[in-house]
Amino acid sequence: MKWVVLSLLTAAASASTDAWTKKFFGRRSAMEMAVFPLAYSLPLFLGTLPFVTVPPLDTVFWWSFAASIPLNCVAFYLYMAAIRQSPLSLTLPFLSLTPVFMIVTGFLVLGEVPSPVAVGGMLAVVGGGYLLNAPSIRRGLLGPLAAVRRERGTLLMISVACIYSFSAVVGKKAILHSSPFFFGMFFFPLQNFLLLVWAFATKSVDRRLLVSRNAVTKGVLVGLFYYCHVLCHVWAISLTQASYMIALKRLSVLFGLVYGALLFREEHLRWRFAGAGAMVAGAAAIALAGGH
C-alpha cells in the first residue's frame, strides 16, 4: 500500500536528516547546525506551495496554527542541541515518550483513562528507556536511571518529547480545520523562515556560513532529506489514519541507531537496539490504541 511505503520513507528521511546534519555540522553550535536543513529545504517548500490546494480556513485553524509555531520552533532547536551533544542511540529513542506524555496530559487535564493496551505501551516505553542504559546496571539497579540524568542530550530530547505532546494536539486541531497536506506545506516554510530570521537577527549564525567552503553540497543534501521527510509525512497521513502512519514512522528511531553505528561507531548497540525496539513497540501500541 502506498501509505506504508510513504511512512517508511518518512522514517528513513527523518533519520537521514538527523544523522547527516550531525555528521556534517555536529562540531558547530546547535543553532548553526539547525540553519542548514532549514535554509536548504526552504526553496523546495516554497516551490511546492503553488501546487497545494487551499481549503476553507476558519478562526480555529488560525489560532491553532499560531500556537503551533513557537512550540515547534523551540522543539526544533532543542532537538538539534540534543543530537549534537549525545549519541543518536541515546537521544532518538526518547522521542517515543511523546505519546506517553500525551496519555498523561489527557488523564490529568481531560480525565481520559488509558486502555490496557496503552498502559502496556507505556510500560514498554519506560522499560525500553531503562534498557538503553543497561550497561550502567553494574552501578546498581538505579544505574541506568542515573545515566539518563547525566546525559544532557537525553534530557533535552525528553523535553522535546514533552513539547511535542502539546504541539501534536494543537497541530491536530489545525489539520482537522484544514488538510494534512496544506498544513504541512504551509507550516514548515513559515517555521523555517522564522527560525532563520531569529538566527541571523540575534547574530547566532553568520549568514556567510551557509555558503562557506563545502557547506553548499552538504546543506543541499540535508535540506533535501528534511523536505522529503515532511513531504512523505503529510502525503502518507492524508492516505490513512494518523495512528497507523505514526506507528510506522517511529521506525525512524531504529534507522537512527543504524546510522549511529555506521557513521559514529556508537557503543553498547545491542542494549540500545533492544531498548529502542521496546520503546518503538510501546509507542506504536499507544498510537494504535488511542489514535495518537
Image (spheres, rainbow, N blue to C red):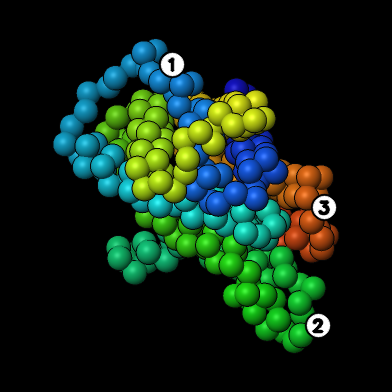
Which of 220 and 138 lies nearest the eye of the viewer? 220
In the foreground, 200 or 41? 200
Q: CA distance from mark 3 to mark 2?
A: 23 Å
Q: Amino acid at mark 1?
A: Gly
Q: Which residue is mark 1?
A: 47
- Viewer-nearest of discs 1 and 2: 1
Q: Residues within 10 Å of mark 2 (few under 14, many from 20)?
A: few
Q: Which mark is residue 138?
A: 2
Residue most extreme to the left: 59
Residue 106 is situated, as x and y percent measured from the top left of the image, at 36, 61
The residue that appears at 75% across and 44% down in the rendered structure is 259
Q: Reading the chain from its start, which is encountered first: label 3 or label 1?
A: 1
> Dividing the picture into quarters, in which one does residue 24 lie?
top right
Q: Neighbour class for label 1 at 10 Å: few (<14), some, many (≥20)? A: few
Task: Tell me which residue sits at (71%, 81%) in the image.
Answer: 143
SS category of the residue bearing label 3: loop
Q: Amino acid at mark 2?
A: Arg
Nearer to us: label 3 or label 2: 3
Screen quadrant of the N terminus: top right
Compared to residue 44, the image places residue 255 above or below, namely below
Q: Which residue corresponds to the image point at 65% horizontal and 26% vertical from the top-left?
A: 217
Indicate the position of residue 83 as horizontal and vertical percent values: 61, 53
Tag 2's secondary structure? Answer: helix
